[in-house]
Image (cartoon, grey):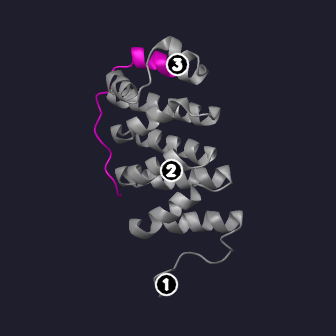
Amino acid sequence: MNRGPYWFSTEPRPGTLEGKLKLLGDLAGAPSERAVPLLLELMCDQSWHVRERAVEALVKRGDQVIEPVKALLAEGLWYTRACAADALGQLADVAGLEALAVRLSDENPSVRKSVSRALAAIAARHGAKTVKDALERAGVSPDLGRLGRLGAAELDLARALIETPPRRDSTRRSGGD
């Protein structure tokens, strides 16, 4: 079957939930240079289900998506920023640390919660010192009292920073498979 350069699904209509889910399935095996921009766009969708599926597909591509996901963390709507933080947390790569640290004081509580979970995931993989250093570079004090004023999720993160040694399997993810 000759699919041509733009073989992504056209039926059902891409504007419907069913169409978006079909597109996500098509993008799973597509080359990165064409799929990643579309997955990033789907990560901005109004549907949580579509966004979560887009995050799953992006995370499978590994560290090659860190930079574009960081850009969404900096500029997207609150739900896009939360998804971007979730993606960076699932990747648990230190390359996302400073972008996450800056968003720890985001105006939206859902974003702060996602950022806190992401930072805790990175602390679990790479150790608390790595995350503490990134927080300090971003001007965020890893002090329990300061983070506790932001919310309960941040207080849990602060506790994790005090108590979490690095895991032994702290190897970087590679992209692609």
Mark 3 residue element: helix
Residue that badge 2 annotates: 72
Rendered location of residue 99, percent (x, y): 43, 39
Query: Closer to us: mark 1 or mark 2?
Result: 2
Q: Looking at the image, is mark 3 or mark 1 nearer the viewer? A: 3
The local crowd at label 1, few if under 14, some if 14 to 19, many if 20 or more residues have their Cα within 10 Å, is few
For badge 1, the amino acid type reads Arg
Amino acid type, label 2: Leu
Give the amino acid type for the residue marked by disc 3 in the picture.
Answer: Leu
In this view, 10 is above or below 73:
below
| Residues shaded magenta | 155-177
Q: Residue at x 45, y 42 (%)?
A: 88
- Residue 3's disc number: 1
Can residue 90 be seen in the rendering of this structure? yes
52 to 169, vertically: above or below: below
Residue holding disc 3: 147
At 57% from the left edge and 41% from the top edge, which residue is drawn? 82
Residue 28 visible: no
Alpha-carbon span between mark 2 and mark 3? 24 Å
